Image: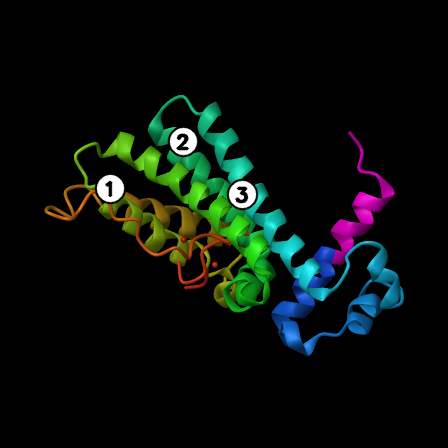
Amino acid sequence: MASSPARSRRVTILRAAADLFAARGFHGVSIEDLGRAVGTTGPALYRHFPGKEALLAAMLLDVSERLAAGGRARVAAAADPEKALAGLLDGHIAFALDEPALITVHDRELGNVPPDERRRIRRLQRGYLEQWVQVLAELHPAAPTAALRAAVHAAFGLLNSTPHILGDLPREETARLLHTMGRSALLSVRGAGAGAPTDGKGPEHVAPGAAGAPGAAPPPPG
């Protein structure tokens, strides 16, 4: 179904804002700057968002929802855990290559999101992380859950490194490299973590992206 003009305009504003926030920081960008970036006046943006904080919240909620929904779809469509893991990697890598600004914004600006929306973002991110953990648990049923979560956080850090490495290699080569390294990191949990508690939740900062997980974080938006 085609997007409505209002929806398309909203997406345009969010993308422009992500680029500006990544380049200059949330506090370094004014409503007037955002308006100029999308060819309108700053006050006109209030038709779409009540303020800059609401725009930032919408941006990070949107990427968190997209990652979570995409992960669920890829896992549901996979014939086995190996293919599910490959699908999760491909989906997150595509996000990280296409929207590196969101990884940077998540890393630096999540604290500027109002508390209620920040909690929603965290819940979505934890759910996304658990999708990966559940797939890894099928591949490594003897591995402690805490070790699986740690491996996913570490892999997110690798995958969300794109704000720092884009341009060094062609896109396809970068995607292959991230997939190979991410898969190796995740599968290295086999046999690791003996004696670790199985109910540890690990750090909350996940995808955006996961920024301290994003070498970076999006993932969002380990």
Which three-letter amino acid code belongs to the residue tagged 1? Thr
Q: In this rendering, does residue 168 appear at all? A: no
Dot placed on the residue nearer the N-terminal end, 1 or 2: 2
> Could you tell me which residue is drawn at 49 percent across and 32 percent down?
72
Q: Position of residue 147 (x, y in %)?
A: 23, 47
The dominant secondary structure in magenta is: helix
Depicted 135 relative to depicted 195: above or below: above
Can you identify the residue that label 2 sits on?
A: 84
Q: Secondary structure at mark 1?
A: helix
| Residue 112 in the figure: left or right of residue 206 | right
Taking the spot 42% from the left edge, 51% from the top edge, the residue there is 178
Residue holding disc 1: 145
Quarter of the rendering occupied by the N terminus: top right
Which stretch did the figure color magenta?
Answer: 1-13
Amino acid under disc 3: Leu
Q: Is residue 6 magenta?
A: yes
Residue under the point 72% across and 65% down: 52
Q: Earlier in the sequence, mark 1 or mark 3?
A: 3
Closer to us: mark 1 or mark 2? 1
For the residues bearing labels 2 and 3, Cβ distance under 8 angstroms: no
